[in-house]
Image (tube, grey):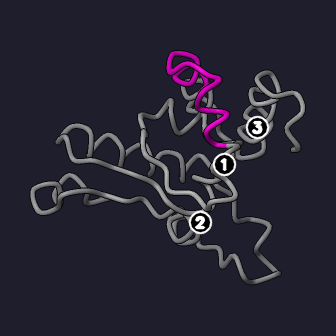
Amino acid sequence: MMMDRFVEEVDFFSIGTNDLIQYCLAVDRSNKDVANLYTAADPAVIRLIQMAIDAANRSEVPVSMCGQMSGNPLYTMLLLGMGLRSLSVTPAAVPEIKRVCRSVTIEHCEKVTKRVKAMDSARHIKTFLKEELSKVFPEFPM
């Protein structure tokens, strides 16, 4: 929320999605009673990520992302469409993420992002992202 103020003080930003999602949604992902509410597809999470990317880009401060969201191919087109260009992923996730990046255009990703931003439920967003990914990779396990 304060990135626009921090840009003068830092050389880069890294958006850590695991904690961001947990704190944004007030959901402890390790608590079995509420863990099902923890989702990167929540519109509030997506808005916070977009705010962070926009603040970094306006000030020309490099921004990257780490956490489970960045290593999940379901979100790759969305993140590219939001303007993110640097993802930190586990070694096991690299081939799938690279494959998505090499198979889509930024223009297509921006259209995906525009549609997602118009949605108001995590369920609809996740369904839409699955449909878009299956158009590119019908064999991807969902």
Separation of residues labelled 3 and 1 (CA atoms): 9 Å
Q: Which residue is mark 2?
A: 25
At x 59% / y 73%, what residue is drawn? 26
Q: Nearer the viewer, residue 134 or 139?
A: 139
| Rendered location of residue 57, percent (x, y) | 26, 39
| Rendered location of residue 52, percent (x, y) | 35, 50
Mark positioned earlier in the residue sequence (2 or 3) = 2
Q: Which mark is residue 123?
A: none
Q: Nearer the viewer, residue 35 or 110?
A: 110
Q: Is residue 62 left or right of residue 41?
A: left
Mark positioned earlier in the residue sequence (3 or 1) = 1
Q: Which residue is mark 1?
A: 41
Q: Categorize mark 1 by other alpha carbons within 10 Å: few (<14), some (14-19), many (20+).
A: many
Q: Is residue 27 magenta?
A: no
Mark positioned earlier in the residue sequence (2 or 1) = 2
| Rendered location of residue 38, percent (x, y) | 70, 65
Q: Quadrant of residue 133?
A: top right
Magenta range is 97-112
Magenta stretch prevailing secondary structure: helix
Separation of residues labelled 2 and 1 (CA atoms): 11 Å
For the C terminus, the image quarter is top right
Amino acid carrying label 3: it is: His
Amino acid carrying label 1: it is: Ala
For the N terminus, the image quarter is bottom left
Q: Is residue 35 above or below residue 38?
A: below
Amino acid carrying label 2: it is: Leu
Q: Which residue is mark 3?
A: 124
Label 2 secondary element: helix
Report if the CB atoms under discs 2 and 3 are less than 8 Å apart: no
At x 56% / y 32%, what residue is drawn? 117
Q: Is residue 117 above or below residue 114?
A: below
